[in-house]
Amino acid sequence: MPDSFVSQPLMQSWIPGVNLLRTYDTKNFNSDLIAGISVAAVAIPIGIAYAQLAGAPPVVGIYSCVFTPLAYALFGSSRQLIVNPDAAACAIVAATTAPLAAGDPGRYADLSIVLTLLSGLFCIAAGIARLGLIANFLSRPILVGYLNGIAITIIVGQLGKLVGVDVASAGVFRTLVNLFKQMPGAQWNTTLLGVTLLVGLLLIRRFVPKIPGPLVAAVSGIGLVYFLGLHQNGVRIIGSIPSGLPAPKLPVVALSDLGSLSMGAATITLVSFCSMMTTARGFATKNGYQIDANRDLIALGVCDLASGLTRGFVVSGADSRTAVADSAGGKTQLTSVVASATIAIVLLFLTAPLGYLPTTALAAILISSSVGLFDFTSLRRYYHISKIEFRHSIVAMLGVMTVGVLAGILVAVGLAILRLLLLASKPHDAVLGIAPGKDYFVNLESESTAKPIAGVLIYRFDSALVFFNADHFASRVRQVIREAKEKPSWFVLDAEAITLIDSSAADTLESLRVELHRDGIRLCIARSKGWFHTMIERTGVAEKIGTDCFFGSVQAAVDAAQSKGTRT
């Protein structure tokens, strides 16, 4: 009895989908069934298209869609999220494995599987270590810029396939030059078919978004090729797709490849999880529930393992298929289960028609998806509310476009670290005063009616005080004293927001106290607490400031200054 009592909560903790099966409300079944079939209908053509993007055979894209939604349904925390091949992840797969494979399809497949398995292991390890906070590492503007760069890279890379010419991929700008040189060899029938399907996809996205555009494009392309015999007139098709569920494959790679694969896997873990959590949180907020970032990090890892062990490639939260699940009325994770089952049925019995799918249709699907991936609205918003964040987004985008997808993540991570350092090294601060009708101290800069207190300068520093911002703190103190309308007798440091201080910053604070004392200004500290107060006591700074210069509130410090006539 004790064993069963313990095992059931543990099972629900590690595999929460089990609890879904136990407590499933059958009233949701019809909506989940319809949503799951709808997801499968969209996932199959997109999966084939993303296989092309990842440099894999078309069937591998379907393999990547079979078991991954089921794995997420069992291990994830979102009710709507669909885990499937993702544009950014596929672009990273191609950038990582293509240089190592050197044109060998068998080696490419092995490298892709190992990359997928490594990504899964990294995600699981990070989730167990409770590192779900990495979803917040790339700020939204930087992530938007990175994904926008990938979107442009994909669009440019698919233009040649759209018009039926082979274009060497060599970065966005060089690829455009190569495309321009090859344009005289474009096939008119391929171009007409591809452009027509692309325009149709864009019109569907714009005016009737609930219609599954990729499915319409795929079925239309297959029908036109089959009935008009376009494949006999130069229009390329993907060819026969093997039927049956994927059998596990034991990959073989050289030890020398593991370094590059590990770097690619780390990149995929960061980008895929950040992107996935943006989607998951959006739909969770819309539907009124919370998600668990650490649990979803483990779930993403399990999905990658499920994909890799069945000869697929890396996956992520798929925003387009999640939107389909939500708009089709999907209420629970059973939507993912139904989608997996439907895709499996297609693999078993319905692969023959897929062989007539034209590659130009796949290019149209990828271009349309990438247009949807490009987030112009957010760029415009950042431009209006924060020029710095807008510039970071543009630099991240240009980084991907110029140095490539893998090196672009280094640009994005570098920008993220730079932004953190800038925010921490020069945090917000304020000089405080009083305003009519308000019983609290206000920022003199932001409150037009506020006035300073005669003889007292109140300064608030909104950050931890440590070695890399201590000099900035001292400079700001000197500046606000210098800019004051009259020289203060008391300088009151509002320390409520200073959660900690290190020894270097404590030394700076002591030097500042000496400097102020020499100028006839008394340094006092209000609302000192926690590690900040502990450290200035340990370093002896508190003793030198004097116990009579510590106050529980800013008001108490002001009252003390006024009662003593603001004299030192």
Image (cartoon, rainbow, N blue to C red):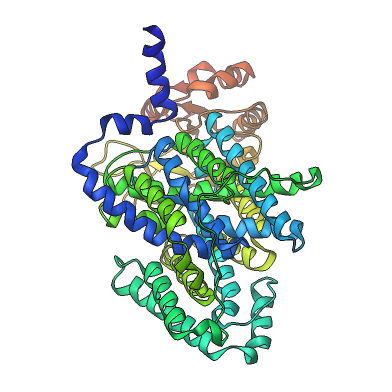
Point out the image quarter for the N terminus: top left
Q: Residue at x 64, y 92 (%)?
A: 184
- Is 201 or 452 nearer to us in this picture? 201
Can residue 390 be spotted in the picture?
A: no
x, y (%) of residue 227?
A: 42, 82
Against 39, residue 122 (above or below) is above
Q: Is residue 1 left or right of residue 87?
A: left
Image location of residue 462, percent across then percent down: 48, 39
In the rendered structure, the answer to whether residue 403 lies left or right of residue 199 reads right
Residue at 66% across, 79% down = 166
Please tell me whether residue 492 is drawn above or below residue 542 in the rendered image: below
Q: Is residue 339 above or below residue 169?
A: above
Q: Nearer the viewer, residue 189 or 12?
A: 189
Q: Nearer the viewer, residue 29 or 523?
A: 29
Q: Residue at x 39, y 72 (%)?
A: 219
* Between 227 and 414, the one nearer to me in the picture: 227
